[in-house]
Image (tube, rainbow, N blue to C red):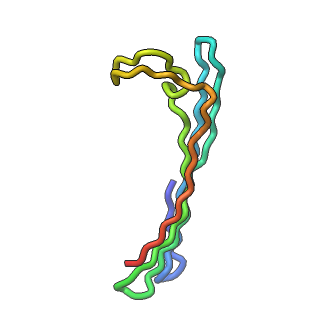
Amino acid sequence: MYEEIAVSPHVNFQFGGRADHQAFTPAVDEPDRTFNNFSGSLGLLVHPTDATSIALSFARAARNPALEELYFHGPHGGNNAFENGDPNLTSEKALGFDASFR
């Protein structure tokens, strides 16, 4: 989801978000895992004049571990590698802040 709201002729507010749900139930002797995450962003765009703009944004991103990162153990011919998964991995999370003047 992404939305932009014009607060005034010179100010726009932007926001977006995404919810992720992922569940794994392996057939072998490995633990079941469920992940719920949210990624989103907030932004402010200001046009003091027709030739300039100031943009500020704050974002949170999250990524669930992939199936192979959790459970693969052994050679993987597709990428010519030996993989050793970790069923105890947690989601990766990041925060970011951006500012620009154009």
Q: Is residue 86 above or below residue 77?
A: below
Can you tell which quarter of the image residue 32 is in?
Answer: top right
Q: Going 39% across and 18% down the picture, which residue do you hit?
A: 76
Q: Is residue 49 above or below residue 23?
A: below
Q: Residue furthest top?
A: 28
Q: Going 65% across and 20% down the picture, which residue do you hit?
A: 31
- In this orientation, does residue 74 appear? yes
- Indicate the position of residue 81 as horizontal and vertical percent values: 38, 22
Can you tell which quarter of the image residue 87 is in?
Answer: top right
- Indicate the position of residue 66 as horizontal and vertical percent values: 51, 31
Q: Going 61% across and 36% down the picture, which residue do you hit?
A: 90
Q: Residue furthest bottom?
A: 49
In the visual, does 9 lie left or right of 38? Answer: left
Q: How many marks?
A: 0
In the visual, does 34 lie left or right of 15? Answer: right
The quarter of the picture where the C terminus appears is bottom left
- Indicate the position of residue 57 as horizontal and vertical percent values: 51, 66
- Indicate the position of residue 84 as horizontal and vertical percent values: 50, 22
Q: Is residue 41 above or below residue 34?
A: below
Q: Going 40% across and 88% down the picture, which residue do you hit?
A: 49
- In this orientation, does residue 14 appear? no
Q: Nearer the viewer, residue 76 or 39?
A: 76
In the visual, does 4 lie left or right of 34? Answer: left
